[in-house]
Amino acid sequence: MIQDHHYWVNLLLGYTGARRAEIAGLLVDDFGVADGIPFVHVRPNHLRGLKNAGGRRRIPLHPHIMELGFAEFVEAARKRKWVALFPQAVPENIRHLAHVVTEDKDAHDPKFGDVLDYMLRTSLDKALNGNPRKLSCHGFRHYVNDHFASLRQDDGSTLAIPDVDRLDVLGHKPRDVNLATYRRAEKPLRPLYQAILTLPRLF
C-alpha cells in the first residue's frame, strides 16, 4: 500500500472529522505532541484559510493513526525540509507556494481539496458499483459527528461526548447562545482525546 497524501488525508479525515481543506492544507509544523497526546493544529496559513473562527483548534490523533506511522511520515517530510505536509494535495495554481515559509495568511477556499474528493469518489465508483450512496470526503465529517452525537452513557439518555467537546473537535460554530458564550477559548486536549478514542478503528 502506498502511504501517499491520499492515504493519509483520508485516514485523518476519518479519525478527526475535519474539513478536507483543513487536513489537506496542514503544514509540517502543524503536527505536535502535548502532555503525551499527539495532535494536528488546524490554523490558517499561506495556503488556505479557515471557514470560521471556531475552525482554529488542536485535534488529538487516534492511536491507529500513530500505529500506522504518521509521526514517521511527518518526520520524513521534516527531513526533506517540506513546508506543506501534503504538497501534492495543494491546488496546482498555488502549489509553487507549498515549500515557501511565510507568515502570510490566505482566505478560505471552498475548493481546496477538490482533487482529493474527486479521486476518492472515482475510486468508490469502481469499488462500490457506482457508489450509489454518493460517498465523498465530507462523509467522514458526518460520520464522526454522528458517532459523537449518538453515543450515550449507561443511563441511555446522557450524552457520552458533551456537545462542547464534539463541537471543539469538529470546529463547529455553536448555535446555542449559552454554549457559544461559555465555549473554551483554549481547548484542553485530554477530553477531546477521550472523545477521539471512542471512534472505532476503520480497518
Image (spheres, grey):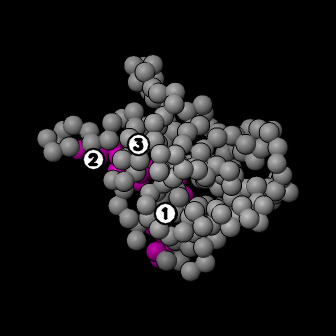
Q: Of discs 3 and 1, which sits in the foreground?
A: 3
Left or right position of 194 against 101 = left
Residue where numbered disc 1 is placed: 65
Q: Which one is closest to the eye, mark 3 or mark 2? A: 3
Q: Position of residue 25 (x, y in %)?
A: 68, 52
Disc 3 packing (10 Å; few <14; some 14–19; many ≥20):
some
- As helix, strand or loop, the secondary structure at mark 1 comes to helix
Q: Quadrant of residue 109?
A: top right
The disc placed on residue 151 is: 2
Rendered-image quadrant of the C terminus: bottom left
Q: Which residue is tagged 3?
A: 190
Q: Nearer the viewer, residue 50 or 122?
A: 50
Image coordinates of residue 15 in percent, x first then y, are 46, 57
Mark toward the start of the polypeptide (3 vs 1):
1
The residue range painted magenta reads: 128-152
Q: Are marks 1 and 2 in contact (CB under 8 Å)?
A: no
Secondary element under disc 2, as helix, strand or loop, is loop
Q: Residue at x 82, y 43 (%)?
A: 102
- On residue 4, which mark appears? none
Queried whether the magenta region covers residue 10, the answer comes back as no
**Residue situated in front as seen by the camera: 49 or 84:** 84
